[in-house]
Amino acid sequence: MNQPKEFSFYARRNLFIFSVTRLISELGSSIFKFALSLYILDITGSATVFSMVLGLSILPGVFVNIFAGVVIDRSNKKKVLVITEILSGIALLIFLPIFLLDSTNVMLLAVFSVILSLIQSFTFLTLNASIPNLVEREKVHSANSSYQSIGAIINVLGPILGAITYRAWGLETIVMINGITFISAGLMQLWLQFRKSDEQTVSSSYLDSVKDVFAYINKQKAIMYLLVIFVGINFMLAPLIQVVLPYVTYQELQLSAQQLSVIQGAWFVGVIAGAIVVSRRKVHQFVITKIFILFQLQAILFLTWCFPLLFPSTAGSLIQMTFIFIMILAVTGFFNSMSNVPMISYVQLYTPEHIRAGVFGVISSITMLATPLGIGLYGILLDRIHWVYLPLASGIVALVMGIMAHKNKELRNFFSQNAEPVLNSVGEKERVSAL
């Protein structure tokens, strides 16, 4: 992939626009979703209704991502990115007067959540598929590091700002501001300069394109193994952080809500620190062949969650327990980010461009499905078995996965390749955009 010299200037500008628009758009989205959650709880007082609306906002992505990825692959990615971002803003501004007329209609809130989720599925898939076209090849990991850091910052600030702005201004003001920020982010993205692809294609049906995506994943064993790893991570990690950690620290160990929030914040601090460190090219090159050693270290850190039972003397000091959990979560987040960024970057670089969004659509759909399933299962198990078995079992399973992945020949070859990414074929006829 020979990159014109003038693209270096555009790549730097692209990275700046990408980072700013992601922060604006996704922080606004996080604030809105958290405020919407509080509003639903306020008007219904029902956890069932709350979970139903939350589920409806997630499920569309699970079922639509695969087909959305194919549409994106066959389209002008810049247009998709700009249009979907602006559409999100327009949808919010259209929703506002309807909401003001019937502010207690839960069905209206649910339908709008589905519509917004569908639009944003296209936005997020386009972003993941576009990063190699926005920056120079050697800067792809830097862009992903930036995206990971922004995501961690948003996960911390979003709920805090959501609660503050909801209590201060109300949901309607948040909707209006968020609509404007989405449109602003979309307009800013008009200045993104996408690298022109050398890929040439022939027309095919959407069904054939979907088949191509699954044929590629089936053929590329390394991608298949990575998909299993992504599913495993999401199935175990999200429940551990979102369900087991609050239950253990708050209910079992009697830590305060403030101590729990600091412990959870330590995870995101670790993620940000890891993303910053791995964004350095030398570190990225060093880490790339040691991804699954980092994965094994994360697994071992899961096992250390059992320390209150293994070392009863620590259980007597709330400050000591808080400090130990802070260190465990911060280091785990650090290793998680250090391994995630290179994995995502390599999948982006070495997946043919004409099916890249489709491949990410499959990965996104399956991992999105794994997360709520894991949360549900871990929640049920917490009521039936001692909590210590969950981090213990998760750590052992993750450790075995990491050892097997590190020894896997296909994965070793995939992450040791240094050749120019193959942007064309998967051994089949080349295809042309139908849009």
Image: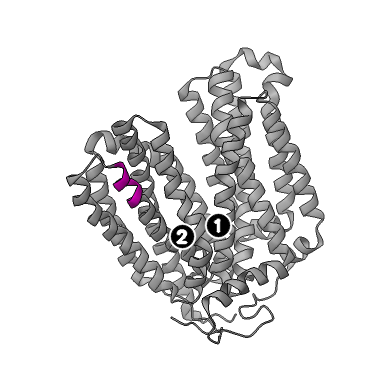
- Tell me which numbered mark, 2 or 1, is placed earlier along the sequence: 2
**Residue plotted at (40% across, 41% down):** 157
Q: Secondary structure at mark 2?
A: helix
**Residue plotted at (70% across, 47% down):** 295
CB contact under 8 Å: marks 2 and 1: yes
Q: CA distance from mark 2 to mark 1?
A: 10 Å
Residue under numbered circle 1: 364
Q: Secondary structure at mark 1?
A: helix
Residue nearest the observer in this picture, 214 or 225:
214
> Would you say residue 111 sits in the magenta stretch?
yes
Which residues lie in the magenta part?
106-112
Residue 409 rendering spot, x and y as whole percentages? 81, 62
For the C terminus, which image quadrant?
A: bottom left
Image-quadrant location for residue 17: bottom left
As drawn, 306 above or below 337: above
Residue under numbered circle 2: 124
User: Is 269 situated left or right of 287 in this image?
Assistant: left
As drawn, 85 above or below 384: below
Binning the other alpha carbons within 10 Å of mark 2 as few (below 14), some (14 to 19) or many (20 upward) gives many
Query: What amino acid is at disc 1?
Result: Ser
> Would you say residue 422 sits in the magenta stretch?
no
For the N terminus, which image quadrant?
A: bottom right
Secondary structure character of the magenta stretch overall: helix
Residue 15 rendering spot, x and y as whole percentages? 45, 64
Image-quadrant location for residue 179: bottom left
**Residue plotted at (39% across, 43% down):** 53
